[in-house]
Amino acid sequence: MILDKIYNEDCLVGMKSISDESVDCVVSDVPYLLVGGGCSEGEYRTAKGHKQPSGIMNRQRSYTKIAGNEHGHTLADGTKHVNLGGCMNDAVEDVRAGKMFAHNDIKFSDWLPDVYRVLKPNTHCYLMINSRNLKDLQTEAEKVGFKFQNLLVWDKGNGTPNKFYMQCLEFILLLRKGGERWINDMGSKNILRTPNIIGDKLHPTQKPISLMRHMIENSTNRGDIVLDPFMGSGSTAIACVQSERHYIGYEIDPQYYEVAQNRLKNETRQLLLF
């Protein structure tokens, strides 16, 4: 297994090549079904075009601004925008199926056993999840051997419209393998107030690098290995680079894999300037 590399493959396949108890921490924004399996007919009509949606469901908007990407188009200002593929109809079908991405139907029980296997004893696993899927994720994690350590709350600083109160936070399930490991900064609070990314995103569910870095630096030391089975736009990898940790990542979507690669190249370029 090569360190400091994101693999463009299914983590269910890729993690098989990672040796037992060789990873120091797992930090990941994991895939899950949305809204218990679908949306209302009203939401479906809206997505079909009766009213232009906003936010992450609008795939016609450009999430990416990556110079030099060969897939996409260049705007008048010279910015290169990546074509993420798919159109509003693709997004509609995903919503009706309760999914944001075509591979979001992966089960927790499919990947949790390998995540547990590759972690060293007395290490931490951070899994970002929404409220609807929190219980199922914790149940499946405990089945494979994980122990509940804490529940962190990410205060995003912005809200998502909802019929039952606006959603302005996400949960982070902190698990441990084996005995207790103290975090490095024991003054850290379990509410993480890191502003969400507003505006142009490189990925619909892109997380701030500083948020990922906070978890990584609290549960690892310099030179340790961090695994992210669902790398997305690469925020975990960049957080590792900035904090001098090694990383292993998987991203099944070739378009987001390319997004992550470009971000890493830009980060490396910036580090070389200092």
Image (cartoon, helix red, strand yellow):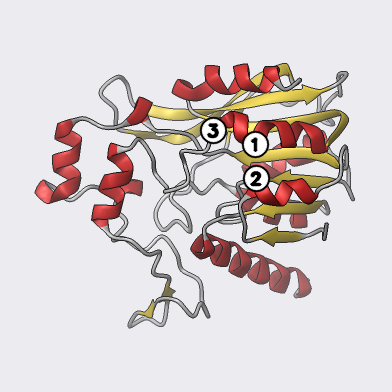
Which amino acid is tagged 1? Trp
Label 1 sits on residue: 111
Taking the view exactly as shown, the residue that stands out farthest to the left is 50
Question: From this viewpoint, is residue 239 visible?
Answer: no
Graded by Cα atoms within 10 Å as few (under 14), some (14 to 19) or many (20 or more), the crowding at tag 3 reads some
Image position of 187 with respect to 223: above or below: above
Query: Residue 12, which numbered label?
Result: 2
Label 3 and label 1: CA atoms lie apart by 7 Å
On-image quarter of the C terminus? bottom right
Query: Residue 107, which numbered label?
Result: 3
Of 164 and 103, nearer the camera is 103
Give whichever of discs 2 and 1 has the lower sequence position: 2
Of 219 and 129, nearer the camera is 129
Disc 1 is placed on an element classified as helix
Q: Residue at x 33, y 61 (%)?
A: 86
Which amino acid is tagged 2? Leu
Q: Quadrant of residue 113?
A: top right
Disc 3 is placed on an element classified as loop
Image position of 155 with respect to 147: above or below: below
On-image quarter of the N terminus? bottom right
Label 2 and label 3: CA atoms lie apart by 11 Å
Of 237 and 208, nearer the camera is 237
* Image marks 2 and 1: residues in contact by CB distance under 8 Å: yes
* Left or right of 47 in this view: 80: right
Q: Residue at x 66, y 43 (%)?
A: 212
Which amino acid is tagged 3? Lys
Image position of 178 with respect to 28: above or below: above
Graded by Cα atoms within 10 Å as few (under 14), some (14 to 19) or many (20 or more), the crowding at tag 1 reads some
* Image marks 3 and 1: residues in contact by CB distance under 8 Å: no
Question: From this viewpoint, is residue 90 visible?
Answer: yes
Residue 134 lies, in percent from the top left, at 53, 21
Residue 213 lies, in percent from the top left, at 70, 44
